[in-house]
Image (spheres, rainbow, N blue to C red):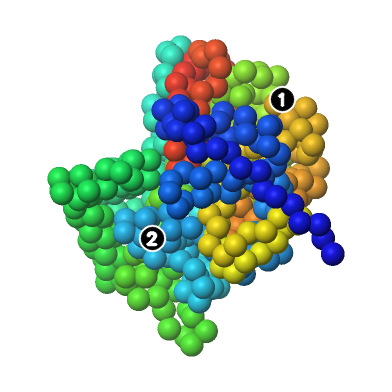
Amino acid sequence: MEEKREIPKVPLFQFIKHSANILKNPLPFHHKNFEAKGDIFTLKIGFKSRIYFSRNAAFAQYALQKNQKNYIKSKIQTEDLVKYVGRGLLTSEGKLWKKQRKLIQPTFHKKQLENLLEAMQEAILIEYERVTPGKSIDIFPILNDLAFQTVVKSLFSSAATAKQINRLQEITESSQRMLIKELRQPYLGWWFKSSGILKKHLEESEEARTILKSIVNTRKASGEKQNDLLDMLLDAKYEDGSSMDEEQLIDEILILFTAGHETTSNALTFTFQLLAKYPEWQDKIYSEVKGNDGLGLMQQVTTFKKTQQVIEESMRLYPPVYFLDRVNKTPDTFNGMEFPAGCNLLFSVFEIHRHKKLWDKPEEFLPERFEEGGRKFSAFYFPFGAGPRKCIGNNFAMFEMIIAVSELVRKYEIIAEFDEIEIIPLITLKPKNAILRFKRR
């Protein structure tokens, strides 16, 4: 019989003492406690609320894969995010999630994505026209627009107007900022409601739905096929032969906007900052790109191994999804530690990706560790999550990032205009002050 083990506790006064710093950046507080308490600890953050923090990769794998049926997403995604983007793949659970995953999965198969690569490249190259050689710029806003435009082009081809696209981007990013406020300042919930701030954001979300319905109905009425994601979603059939109803389709599109652009823009920004700090890897990527001129886009995204290694190492050091949240439906035990039903579990991907017992020289940028691909690290490398709920768009994101990195390095040398890479841990891990300078090759 497995020996029972106590889960180390962090006193509430420690949380209160450091609350101002935690509000800005909770990662140093987490790291300090992991180093002092071990790979799993618990923290009481109120009279009743308790959170369990883990950087134990085996526990993460257990919850996300081996016993995933007992571990569901927390209310952050299944309730808080739902009011802005609806109930789709990212925010649903149980039967609805299974039904939608089975329906949408084929849309993101590599063979289907091949049809989207030209649209991706076009959107990327248009945004790169905003890069001014010799001028120091914060690259994040350009990459943020690039990622959004790539999702839009892949979804709608040319069906959406520039005005519609700009408004959708405004609403998507405004909703995310509002959600962050709600999560970071729950004690102001009464003010958000009484002041009308929350109502304003919910009305904007309805406006986004109206815009999307207009685009979808225009496509249906045209009878034309563009071979984009919208066509694939419209053509997708459930087992009984029926299609998604309009509301469900809009939910899935809103989630593609939300999940599909922010994580990618974050990852690309960190990747370019790392390339600026380690120019020898720029040279390797440039040689790879120039040595394979003439390849088709699908051949490029599957052949550019150096480019992929750099992206994978960047997502190890700076995973955009830097924590994964789960709640256990029934009581469970792991390594002798007992978890009553309803535990709020936060798995720190950031800490797992830098764990000294898992990685050789974990704080160093060493893309060569991914020379044989990421599969050998699958037990403790989770840039897209793990298990059945692994991000459905992981291939889409990797293809987009490989094209984005290779195209920028093809044109420019990237020069660092910052001292250290700064981070802002919000819903995702965001970059701060990513100031770079570009020299035309």
Residue 354 higher or lower than 173, as above or below: above
Tell us which disc is closer to us: 1 or 2: 2
Q: Residue at x 62, y 18 (%)?
A: 277
> Whole-Å distance between the Cαs marked 1 and 2?
38 Å
Within 10 angstroms of label 2, few (less than 14), some, or many (20 or more) residues?
Answer: some
Question: Which residue is tagged 2?
Answer: 79
Earlier along the polypeptide chain: callout 1 or callout 2? Answer: 2
Q: Residue at x 65, y 23 (%)?
A: 282
Give coordinates of residue 430: x percent, y percent.
47, 34
Give coordinates of residue 12: x percent, y percent.
50, 38
Amino acid at pointer 2: Glu
Image quadrant in which the C terminus is located: top right
Residue 347 higher or lower than 404, as above or below: below
Left or right of residue 358, residue 71 in this image = left
Which structural element holds mark 2?
helix
Give coordinates of residue 89: x percent, y percent.
47, 64
Question: Which residue is tagged 1?
Answer: 364
Amino acid at pointer 1: Glu
Give coordinates of residue 367: x percent, y percent.
73, 31
**Residue furthest bottom in the image:** 240
**Could you tell me if residue 407 is visible in this image?**
no
- Closer to the camera, 174 or 226? 174
Within 10 angstroms of label 1, few (less than 14), some, or many (20 or more) residues?
Answer: few
- Closer to the camera, 107 or 273? 273
Residue 56 higher or lower than 134, as above or below: below
